[in-house]
Structure formats: C-alpha cells, structure tokens
Amino acid sequence: MELKRVVVTGFGAITPIGNNAKDYWENLVKGVSGAAPITLFDATQFKTKFACEVKDFNPLDHFEKKESKKMDRNTQLGIVAAREAIEHSGIMGSDIDKNRVGVIWGSGIGGLETFENEVLGWANTDIPRFNPFFIPKMIADITGGQISIEYGFHGPNYTTVSACASSANALIDAKMLIQLGKADVIVCGGSEAAVTASGVGGFNAMMALSTRNDDPTTASRPFDKDRDGFVLGEGAGTIILEEYEHAKQRGATIYAELKGGGMSADAHHMTAPHPDGLGAYLVMKNCLDDAGLSTDDVDHINMHGTSTPLGDIAESNAISRLLGDHAFDIQINSTKSMTGHLLGAAGVIEAIAAVHTIIHNVVPPTINHFTDDENIDSRLNFTFHNAVEKQVNVAMSNTFGFGGHNACVLFAKI
C-alpha cells in the first residue's frame, strides 16, 4: 500500500508571546521573553512567583458569556487557536466532506483550574454540591470535542495524553491516519492552562520550576550553566494537516510537508531523562527513518530544551550521537527560552515554529544564555542571542514528557 503524503495548510497559536501565529513568530525572531509575575492567582506564598501567561486574553472577546462559563481556560485557548488555523487554511470555504475531517488534540493535564476550583469549593463548604459542567469542563478530551461540534467535523476525534509530548503525539497520529486514507484533513493541536495554584505548587514540590523570582525574564535559560528549572507556560496551537492531493485539488496554500514522526520511551524514570539520552536518540532516529531521510539532510532542530539541569545535557548528547560531525553544522535552538514550557501544548507550538523556519529560512534564537555549561558540547550551535538567516529545507522538533514519553516530528520544504 502506498502511503499518502501529509502537508501543512494552516496554523493558529495563542501563546505567552503572541495571541496569534503571526505575532508569535515575530516575537520568537525578536527574542522576546514571555515570563512575568503571575497574575492568574495570588502567588505570594509560592516558591515560584512568575510564569509565562497568555496576556490580554478575555474569553468574552471570543465566546458568549453563557458559553464561556461551560469551558475551562484550557478549552477556551484551544478553540481560539483552532479557529485561527481553520480560517487560515480556508477549508471551510472549500467543498470538503466533513465526514473526512477529524480533530486530534493533545493535553497533558486538561482542565486543572476547573478541578481545583470545584474541589476547593466543596472542601470549603463541606457540602457535596458541584457544578453540572464540572466533569465536561475538566476532562482532557473536551477541547477536541468542542471543536468538532462547532464546525460539524465527523472524522476521527480523540485526545492524546503523554504529558509534555501530548500534542506532538497528536501530530504523529494525525499524520498516520491521513497516510492510511482514514481522513482528508485533521485539525491537530494542543492546549494547556496549568498556571494555577495547584499547577505551580505541584511543580514546585518536585523542584522542577525555576525560582529566579528576582529576574523572571531571564529565568528560562536552556543550556546555561546556571539554569535552575523550567518556567511554566500556557497557551495553545493548531496545525491543519491535509492529504497532499486533497490540498492541491482545492487550491490550498501548502506551507510544508510533515514527512516524519518518531516515538520512543526512555523506560528509565518517572521524571528524569535517560542519562545517556537513549530515548532522545531513538526518537530522532525513528523520525528520520520514518521520513526516509539521512542525518545529513537535517538543517535545524527545535530542541525540547526545557532549562532543566539533566534534560538539556541528555538531549544535547543525543543530537551529537545521532548526527556526528553534522551536528556542528546545523542550527539548533530552544524556543522555550521565550515561551516557557507549555506542557501538553509545547509540541504543537514548537512544530509551528519549525514550519516557520522553513517558510522564512530564519531560525529563532535561544535567549538568556550567560555561562557555558562544561557538560554540554560547545561546538553545538544553539543560536544564542540572535535569530540566524539560514536555508532550512528540513526541520525537526523534539518533545519529551514525564514518564519517558518521547516524540519527534520532521517537516520538509515542498
């Protein structure tokens, strides 16, 4: 059976550094930090008092008041990103078969704010009385369901949950379904809204977050010797994936081809990466094999690069092992230095960044680098400080999650 080709025909984003895909990309290239003191709850007593929040977001600008109350912030952000991508792709202006349009979504946590509010509300009153929308607002799959309801898409519809790899896994699943002829178009993305008391408190308890409260804008510093943890972010992204001939037939603008998707497991530890970067190496190798490309074809890698002491070393070593000397010829970066870590939404917003490097032949910087880490090979080009113009024909994006879940996607110029 000959597999069908899968292409990108639209994208949308709402992030800590831009409330649409255009602003997000422009601020990535400029090297803008999205970190600032937390405003979504009172973080005075918390070890970490800052995060990468979405700015200037009012649900009532996007939803009727009655409808907004039925949605967690996680779903609200997801629908906004999906609407932008759907409009950008032009699929609603085409004669498409909605029975062959699916929605595959990714979220690592789901409606955390809703869960927190409802449980605290019950605990404070001691009366077991809950909002009838508690469960529908909280469950991780509801965003994909809401998107399909709004647009009448009857194709495959489900949510992937693999911690921080969730939306990258959604992209890979969507790719495979289109390749096998199970759908013509899939609205694919992820969202997360975990900047809550329990979200920050929980990550603080496991000592995962930066506590650089005196200088939040430089707290996310991947590959820097003095990195002290990731910065929690929130937001959503959406990519429209479409079968190549279907896209050509309707005259769609094609931005890139999704040629490869790789998956692996560290099989090592609940939260720590394999010390030798084994899972990271395998997932990139599997992705290249799936794409039918060699290591020399790679021009750019958007790394997982969370700014954690162990993770940055393991991933850097894996790239060196996989690419050999070619690793020193390519531009690699971590856009988390600007957006923070969007957990389940990280995979898709970083995939959007990778697609844009192909469109524009520009690699955004890794910001906030001050001191080299002797445990990381200094010959690797992390694109520190400033964006670099470079011909990018093939771009990869890594996303790794707690539990040892690894996902890698590869886009190519078309």
Image (cartoon, grey):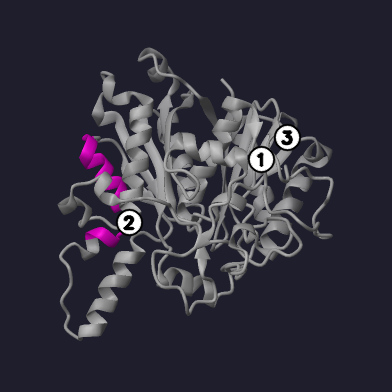
Q: Dividing the picture into quarters, in which one does residue 196 lie? A: bottom left
- Name which residue type carries label 1: Ile
The correct choice, above or below, for 126 with respect to 235 in the image is below
Q: Is residue 140 magenta?
A: yes
Q: Which residues are magenta?
A: 136-152
Circle 1: element type? strand
Q: Position of residue 126 (x, y in %)?
A: 20, 86
Say whether residue 159 is left or right of residue 257.
left
Q: Which mark is residue 295?
A: 3
Of circles 3 and 2, which is in front?
A: 2
The correct choice, above or below, for 392 with respect to 171 in the image is above
Q: How many marks?
A: 3
Main SS type for the magenta part? helix
Inter-mark Cα distance, 1 to 3: 11 Å
Circle 3: element type? helix
Who is closer to the viewer here, 350 or 340? 340
- Name which residue type carries label 3: Thr
Q: Earlier in the sequence, mark 2 or mark 1?
A: 2
Kindly identify which residue carries mark 1.
301
Residue at coordinates 53% horizontally, 26% vertically from top-left? 256
Q: Position of residue 328 (x, y in %)?
A: 81, 40
Residue at coordinates 28% horizontally, 52% vertically from top-left? 142
Q: Position of residue 323 (x, y in %)?
A: 76, 40
Residue at coordinates 72% horizontally, 63% vertically from top-left? 275
Kindly identify which residue carries mark 2.
73
- Name which residue type carries label 2: Arg
